[in-house]
Image (cartoon, rainbow, N blue to C red):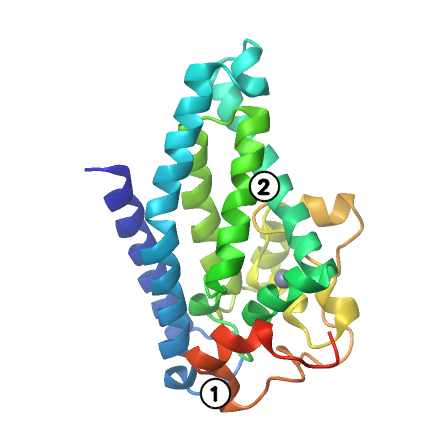
């Protein structure tokens, strides 16, 4: 079985399992019905997967193999044990996408694309990969740059992409976790209850909890917030109508002229 089929099988298994748990033990009451968001979310996920995600990990992997062959990148220059280099790469990639996430909130041009992800007024497993296709392209170029600089191996990229998409589905999912279990888990990884605060309508809350996998980056760099501090309203104040969730609205949203961030 090719690595792409493995990724797709894993992807749909995680998606299906989390959607089922959401149905059995939901965390929050939904504002909109699933059908009002899921069509757009699935279309965006499909566009991402078909246009970019399927071709590009292969592309990133091909580039990574090329860099290894040519001896480019830090990890291809220094002698490191293969398994150690995978661990270093996974931690490094997680840190790099934490930084990328902060940048995509701070630079207005990038925020306009990232805002599409934040427009979802309910969070569930389908929100996890609902990104504007252009943001996905940016993120691929960003990763490619660091794969080149650090000489990250194709094995590391594949493992990281699988962990990242599974973790994103987990920490956007609307599932209830027992409180003590959630607090213990949160010491190491980003839980749904930690990540949802990042989707708050309030900017000082959405400027927190940027992590995707490990929860310690936010603690180390002081971008951590434990809970919602006022209301627990999520989404974007400018885009709260059902029509704002349509596929067309989401695709054109970055190009709209609106006054506020
Ligand atoms: Zn964000």
Q: Position of residue 22 (x, y in %)?
A: 42, 71
Tally the numbered discs. Answer: 2
Residue 260: which numbered mark, if any?
Answer: none
Location of the N terminus by quadrant is: top left
Quarter assignment of residue 58: top left
Classify 10 Å Cα crowding around label 1: few (below 14), some (14-19), many (20 and above). Answer: few
Residue at 33% across, 49% down: 54
Residue at 59% across, 53% down: 190
**Secondary element type, mark 2:** helix
Residue 94: which numbered mark, if any?
Answer: 2
Using residue 125 as the reference point, say whether residue 199 is left or right of it: right
Quarter assignment of residue 143: top right
Ligand 1's image quarter is: bottom right
**Secondary element type, mark 1:** loop
| 3D distance between C-alphas at marks 2 and 1 | 32 Å
Classify 10 Å Cα crowding around label 2: few (below 14), some (14-19), many (20 and above). Answer: some
- Residue at numbered disc 1: 32
Using residue 227 as the reference point, say whether residue 191 is left or right of it: left
Q: Position of residue 243 (x, y in %)?
A: 48, 89
Using residue 42 as the reference point, say whether residue 217 is left or right of it: right
Cβ atoms under marks 2 and 1 closer than 8 Å: no
| Observer-nearest of 212 and 99 | 99
Q: Is residue 158 above or below residue 243?
A: above
């Amino acid at each position: 079985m090719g690595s792409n089929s493995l990724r797709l099988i894993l992807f749909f298994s995680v998606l299906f399992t989390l959607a089922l748990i959401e149905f059995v033990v939901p965390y929050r009451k939904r504002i909109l019905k699933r059908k009002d968001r899921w069509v757009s979310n699935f279309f965006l996920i499909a566009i991402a997967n078909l246009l970019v995600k399927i071709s590009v990990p292969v592309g990133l992997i091909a580039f990574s193999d090329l860099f290894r062959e040519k001896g480019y990148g830090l990890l291809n220059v220094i002698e490191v044990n293969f398994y150690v280099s995978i661990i270093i790469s996974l931690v490094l990639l997680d840190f790099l996408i934490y930084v990328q996430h902060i940048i995509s909130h701070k630079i207005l041009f990038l925020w306009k694309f990232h805002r599409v992800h934040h427009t979802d007024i309910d969070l569930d497993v389908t929100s996890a990969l609902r990104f504007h296709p252009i943001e996905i392209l940016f993120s691929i170029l960003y990763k490619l740059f660091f794969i080149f600089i650090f000489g990250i191996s194709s094995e590391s990229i594949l493992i990281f992409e699988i962990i990242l998409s599974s973790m994103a589905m987990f920490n956007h999912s609307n599932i209830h976790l027992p409180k003590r279990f959630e607090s213990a888990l949160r010491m190491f990884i980003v839980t749904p209850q930690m990540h949802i605060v990042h989707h708050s309508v309030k900017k000082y809350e959405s400027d927190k909890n940027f992590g995707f996998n490990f929860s310690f980056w936010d603690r180390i760099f002081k971008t951590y917030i434990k809970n919602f501090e006022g209301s627990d309203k999520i989404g974007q104040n400018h885009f709260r109508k059902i029509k704002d969730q349509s596929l067309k609205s989401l695709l054109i949203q970055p190009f709209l002229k609106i006054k506020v961030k």
